[in-house]
Structures are given as C-alpha cells and as structure tokens.
Amino acid sequence: MYVAIDRGRRRSPAVSAAVSVAAIGIICKAPQPGRSKTRLATAIGEVAASELSACFLRDVAAAIEAVPEALGRRGYGVYAPAGTEDVMRQLLPAGFGLLLQAGDDLGHVLLGATRALLDAGHDCVLLVNGDSPTLPIHLLVQAIEAMREPGDRMVLGPASDGGYYLIGLKHPHKHLFTQIAWGTETVARSTRERAAEIGLATTLLAEWYDVDDIETLRWLQDELAGHSTRFRGGGSAPASRAFLKDAPQVSQ
C-alpha cells in the first residue's frame, strides 16, 4: 500500500486552488552503500556510487523545482525501501511529498504511483527516474503542457538505453505496464505499442539518458565539460558537478 507522507507541508501560495497541479514523482531508492548504483559501484566503489546517487536525486529535484510554479506542479520522492524517510527528507526540497513504493516490479511501482498521485487530486502525473541529473527543465515543461492538452494521452521521454526517463499520464492505464521486459532495450518501444493497442495518443519528448554504469558516467562528465555532441541543453547539475570535481576515484 502506498503511504503519502507530508507532515503538514502546504502547497505554495503561488499555486491557487484554481490551478491544476501536476505531480512530478522521482522514482528512486534511498542512497545506501552496497544498495545504490550497483553497476557503477563496481567501477568507482560502493561509497562513491551511493554519494553520487544522492547528488543525482538532488539535481533531478532541483530541475522539478525550477519548473515555473505558474504551470502548477508539485514534486514527490517515490522511494524505497521503507524506513528511509529521514534520508529522503534530507535529500529533497522541503516542498516535496514522499510516497513509498509498492509492488514487486517496476511496472507495479509505476502503476501504483500513478494511481496514488491521481487519487491525491493531481490532474496528471509525470514519473521520472532519479538517474538523469542533467534532465532538461524544458522537457518537464513540455510534458506538463502536453498533459494539459484536451483528451487522454501519454507523454513518453525515451532514454538512450531503450527505456524511458519520463512517463506522463492522466489516467492509470494498467495495459501500459503489462508484458514489458523491464531493464531491456525494448521498454520504450513496447510501451508505445501498448498505448497504440488501447488507442492512447502518445507525445514523444527528445531522447535523454540515465547514468547507470561507467560508460554513461563518462557521458555525464563530457556533458558537464561541454564536450558532448549528443546531449546538449541539459541542466547544470550542481550537486553532481561538485561531487565529480572533488572525487579523484571517479575522474580516473
């Protein structure tokens, strides 16, 4: 069961009750050595991987906070495991809500989060991964604007590895999360096929990338140094940038 944890937090006065509010949830795990970024940890060590994961979360959350409030949005950490609420509160901005993940695979997590956030009164839900520290703010804005167009639809942000870094929905369509080979290069394609099967219009965003291993970490370092020819216009990722600058075991 999902549990929303707010403890008295209130919506910013800048967002009135008349404004629709999109939920933007970061799908994430609380950074813990040995449990965070395990593929990356084999190259840079468990502690560094955990600390870098925390930086990623801070940067993605900052991108969400940079979306103009006039659009109507609120950030959430959709987190695991249970019992790490204090860790997540220290990482995320004060205005974020927390939502405990439920389910035994990613499909259940995504569907459950969509249902819970829509049930909380949001007009639409964007779910983003916590591994894209330079996620461009304009892609989040485009996703919200697409969600506000008339009619039911899905917004999908395809990732370079064949998955997706963002999915946006107005209704919890279970079919989108069934028969998906999670963790493979077919995820985004299969999700679009599921949408077509139920006649759900799809808006595609530009491709972006997740940092999951040493290769994609190098992509991030190239992007932050201004050397990437593939990914441009991303966020400044100040937390990740500062960590990488001061972490010699990562820069080798």
Image (cartoon, grey):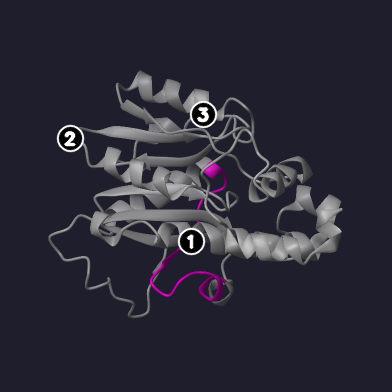
Q: In the visual, does 19 lie left or right of 206?
A: left
104 to 3, vertically: above or below: above
- The answer to the question of whether label 1 and label 2 lie on touching residues, with beta carbons closer than 8 A, is no
Under mark 3, the amino acid is Ala
Residues under labels 2 and 3: Cα distance?
Answer: 24 Å
First reached walking from the N terminus: tag 3 or tag 1: 1
Secondary structure at badge 1 equals helix
Q: Identify the magenta region.
A: 88-106
What's the residue type where badge 1 is placed?
A: Ala
Residue that numbered label 2 is attached to? 150
Density class for disc 3 (Cα within 10 Å; few <14, some 14-19, many ≥20) is many
Residue 80 is at least partly visible in this image: no
Left or right: 221 with respect to 71?
right
> Residue placed at 85% from the left, 50% from the top?
43
From the image, tell me which residue sits under label 3. 188
Residue 227 in view of the camera = yes
| Mark identifier at residue 61 | 1
List the single residue furthest toward the bottom.
8
Label 1 neighbour load within 10 Å: few <14, some 14-19, many 20+: many
Towards the viewer: 237 or 119: 237
